[in-house]
Amino acid sequence: MNGTPGPSLLTRRQALATAAGGLVLVVARPARATPEAMQDVIRTFTGGAKVTEGRVKLDVTLLVENGNSVPLSVSVDSPMTAADHVVRIGVFNEKNPLPDVAIFNLTPRCGRATAATRIRLNDTQMITAIAQMKDGSFWSDTSEVIVTLPACVEG
Amino acid sequence: MARALINVPSKAKRGDVVEIKTLMSHPMETGFRTGSDGALVPRNIISRFACTYNGEVVFSAELFPAISANPFISFTTVATESGTLVFSWTDDKGQTQVQTAAITVE
C-alpha cells in the first residue's frame, strides 16, 4: 500500500460498498405482517368459525400523527350476563411486523364489554377487532387508520 | 419495572359498573428496533396483564409488541363488594409486578 490504489483495493472498496448497501436495504425493509398473515392469525383466533360484521364497535382515530401511541378502544353490544357475555376480544392489524395487537379476556364481572389501550402502528392500514361470545359466535368491526409518522421509523 | 398508575374509584354503589384505568411504566421493547451499535435490541414486552377482584379474575389481557411503551389498559368491573383489586403485569424476563387498590362498596 503506497499511495496509488491498486485495482484490488478498488474492488475491495466496491465489494464493501455493495455489502453495506445490501445491509441497508435489509434494515430498511423490516419484516411486515401482510393482510394474509392477519387472516391466518384471525383463523387461529376463531378456529375457522364464521365471523359476522356487527355488534362490535372499534373506536380509533382515523388520522393519527404519531404511530407510536394510538388510542384504541373497543366495545361490544352485550348484556354481559353469565349466560350471554363476551369471552374474548382480539385486535389485529395488517402491516405491523406482527399481525397481533392484543387479546382481552372478559368475564361477566366486567359489567360492560369494553376495553381500551394505546397501540403502535407502522403504516396506514386496516385494524380489525373480533369478539367471541359465550355462545361461540364471532363478531367483528374494521377501521382504517391513516398514519403520518409511523412507529418503528427510527433505529 | 417501575410503579404503575392505577385509577379505581375509592367508593362505589353496589352493582355499579366502575371504570378502571392502569398505566404501567415499561419500555415495551419490540425486538424489531436496532440500537446505536446496529444490533437488534432484544424483545422485552409485558405480555400478560390480569386483574383480580377479591381473588376472582375479572379481566386479563395478552399483549403483543404492537402495544405502546408504558402500556395503558382500561376496562370496567361491577362493584360487587368492598375489597381489593390486585393488578399484575408480567414481562418477557419473567418479572411480575403486582399492585393493589382498595374499593369501598356501599
Image (cartoon, grey):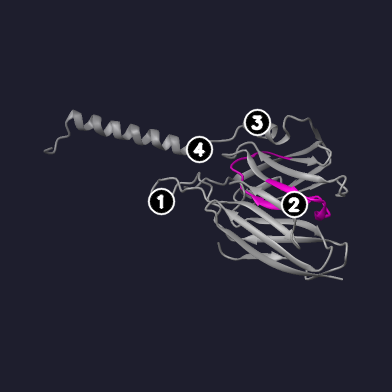
Q: CA distance from mark 3 to mark 4?
A: 20 Å
Indicate the secondary structure of the residue bearing disc 3. Answer: helix
- A148 or A139, which lies in front? A139
Dot 4 corresponds to which residue? A30
Residue at the far left in the pictured view: A2
Question: Which residue is drawn at the image coordinates 52% and 53% (left, top)?
Answer: B93
Q: Give the numbered dot on residue B3.
A: none
Seen in the picture, residue B91 relative to A28 is either above or below; the reply is below
- Marked residue nearer the N-terminal end (2 or 3): 3
Query: Is residue A29 visible from the viewing direction of this image?
Result: yes
* Type of the residue with mark 4: Pro
Q: Secondary structure at mark 2?
A: strand
Near-viewer residue (A61 or A79):
A79
Please tell me how many numbered marks the rendered image carries: 4
Q: Chain of mark 3?
A: A
**Label 1 close to label 4 by CB (< 8 Å):** no
Q: Amino acid at mark 1?
A: Ser
Tell whether B25 sits left or right of B31. right
Reading the image, the residue beneath label 1 is: B36
Q: Earlier in the sequence, mark 2 or mark 4?
A: 4
Task: Please determine whether, in this image, residue A16 is positioned above or below residue B5.
Answer: above
What residue did someone put label 2 on? A115
Q: Nearer the viewer, residue A84 or B41?
A: A84
